[in-house]
Amino acid sequence: MLRSTTLLRSGISRRMAGGAGTAAPSFRWMSSGESIIPDEYVEEGDETEGEWKGCTRKFLAPISVKARGHEILNNPLYNKFTAFKGGERDRLRFRGLLPPRRVNMKIQKERVLQEIRAEESMIRKHQIIEDVHDRNETLYHRILVDHMEEMAPIIYTPTVGQACNEFAMRYRRTRGMYFSAEDRGHMAAMVYNWPQKDVTVIVVTDGSRILGLGDLGANGMGIPIGKLSLYCAAGGIAPHRVMPVVLDVGTDNKALVNDKFYLGLQQPRLTGASYYHLVDEFIQAVLHRWPDVLIQFEDFSSDKAQKILNKYRDETLCFNDDIQGTGATTLAGILGGLRAKGEKPTSLGDQRILIAGAGSAGVGVAQVLLQAMIEHGRTEEEAKKCFFIADEKGLLGTERLGELSPEQALFARDTDGGLSLSEIVNKHKPTMILGMTAVAGLFNEQLIKDMAKHCERPIIFPLSNPTAKAECTAEQAYEWTDGRCIFASGSPFGPVQMKDGRTFYPTQCNNMFVFPGIGLGVTLCGAKTVSDRMLYVAAEALANFVTEDELAEGKVFPNLTTIRDVSKKVAIAVIEEAIRTGQASKLSEKDLADLDGFVSRKMYDPVYVPIVGEKYV
């Protein structure tokens, strides 16, 4: 029961005595003691029967739309399939346009999962879930959030590689924007063709280096679509605030040039100034419409990726996931590996690191690791001595400075230039080897056994994807090191059972552990750039999320079921760094007082909310 209350009539007599013109009496209720919430006022649960079964009647802020009827049913941002309640069907004018039975999201999800699990082909699974994506984004992202471990390999690596290869043949519905060489001079106007006014994240590719598959041209659209699905599900960015983009500058893939079904420009790729002018027009156009947007560069070829990043990183909110995202994720895995070996993070500067692959990803990883060593107190010269970076010509040496990029030249060694991987292993005895070559089987049995001979617990990260391009498999790495290695890979591998009964659970060194949280953090706080130290604190937050039990099982990354919590921790770390450097322009005092609560409230949760036509608002 409620305690009795007393009506306080403060100053009534004075006001009444004041005569004409005196303010009317004001009344205020005040409890005579501590208030008690009545027993009936309990947390409201979901309904148990009728069309609301399994749903809540609690207040959910509605969204206002201009569309009605078929327009809503054909818009994946608003469509709920058969979950529209009777009132909504009347209000939005599509009663009779759907089957009469109303089913809740739980049943809808079960039906989709049953269909996916009945298929053995990964590409068929991909088609089924992407069909949902094209018709009902809320349901799609709910499935991803609730079943991320099962869905991630379907919507992204390794399956997305095949999806890109077959993109033109499977094209069903427009998604994203294409800026081509034919659009020069029109991009400032083109961006207004995008229907959403509030875009906070753009993922853009030119299709020149899709995973380990090379030049796929406009077929590379599958990459931005997949990345942004992870931004929404793992990072809590609302789907109406993301935009996938392809810069179609042509293709040098002869098979695509001669493919009558290919949907991109069938002409040689732009090069030189013409290419960079197109990129710049695109950047200026999107920034003009959305000044605070985060631009993520994805799968640009190595000869252009670093140059584009260098051009814009200090003046634009942008980052390159292949260079910086891969670097931060790999750093987190290595820090986890050092923990598993009983070493402190500061021992990173004591390691001997062999990187196979001197492209944008390999050099990008080296740059992030170098910055981490400097963060731990090493000088740049001391840190550089830890690295051995090799390409197809062998160990990078100073005798090749004329042909190396400035970023590669930073890691060129004064001696031993041209040594093979095997020669580097046997002479310099590295404690870890990282593969970013897309050369399947490059880490052969003898190479890995030599690593294990010189190091009690070698860190072995074959990071190329898709799976068919991995430098070695998890089973090979564990077998050839007698289970002593610390392993992570670019594509997923299943558990490995050793002959002696031990079982290891390799984890995927997947950028999805980092980039959604970085994007969430910088866009929420209003940062103007993505700094190197933001990448470091993101990696540190990820590394610290791994539990001791997970490390004991051979895992150096957390379980994918925790990805939303990981993204929140990464976002908070990035925001704290932005605050420290004066970049957090959007945060109020209230937000600063409770960053955890602030980030949690801002993360998109895919649930059905009421829809009303604008005339009713």
Image (cartoon, helix red, strand yellow):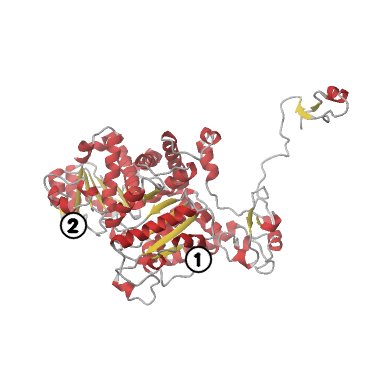
Q: Is residue 250 left or right of residue 449?
A: right
Compare residues 303 and 60 and report the one nearer the observer: 303
SS under mark 2: loop
Spatial CA span between label 2 and label 1: 41 Å
Q: Is residue 237 left or right of residue 38?
A: left
Eyeballing the image, is 438 above or below 581? below
As drawn, the residue found furthest toward the bottom would be 260
Q: Splitting the image into 4 quarters, where does residue 100 fall? A: bottom right
Eyeballing the image, is 124 above or below 519? below
Residue at 20% from the left image edge and 48% from the top image edge: 409
Marks counted in the figure total 2
Q: Position of residue 227 (x, y in %)?
A: 42, 56
Query: Callout 1, which amino acid?
Result: Asp
- Residue 506 showing in the rendered view: no
* Residue behind mark 2: 392
Q: Which of the image's four quarters has the N terminus?
A: top right
SS under mark 1: helix
Q: Is residue 67 left or right of residue 222?
A: right
Query: Callout 2, which amino acid?
Result: Glu
Residue at 29% from the left image edge and 56% from the top image edge: 304
Q: Position of residue 121 (x, y in %)?
A: 41, 66
N-terminal of the two: label 2 or label 1? 1
- Residue 415 showing in the rendered view: yes
Q: Position of residue 350 (x, y in %)?
A: 22, 36
* Residue behind mark 1: 131
Residue at 29% from the left image edge and 72% from the top image edge: 254
Residue at 32% from the left image edge and 37% from the top image edge: 339
Q: Position of residue 148 (x, y in %)?
A: 46, 53
Between tags 2 and 1, which lies in front? Answer: 2
For the residue carrying disc 1, how many other residues have a C-alpha within 10 Å: few (<14), some (14-19), or many (20+)? some
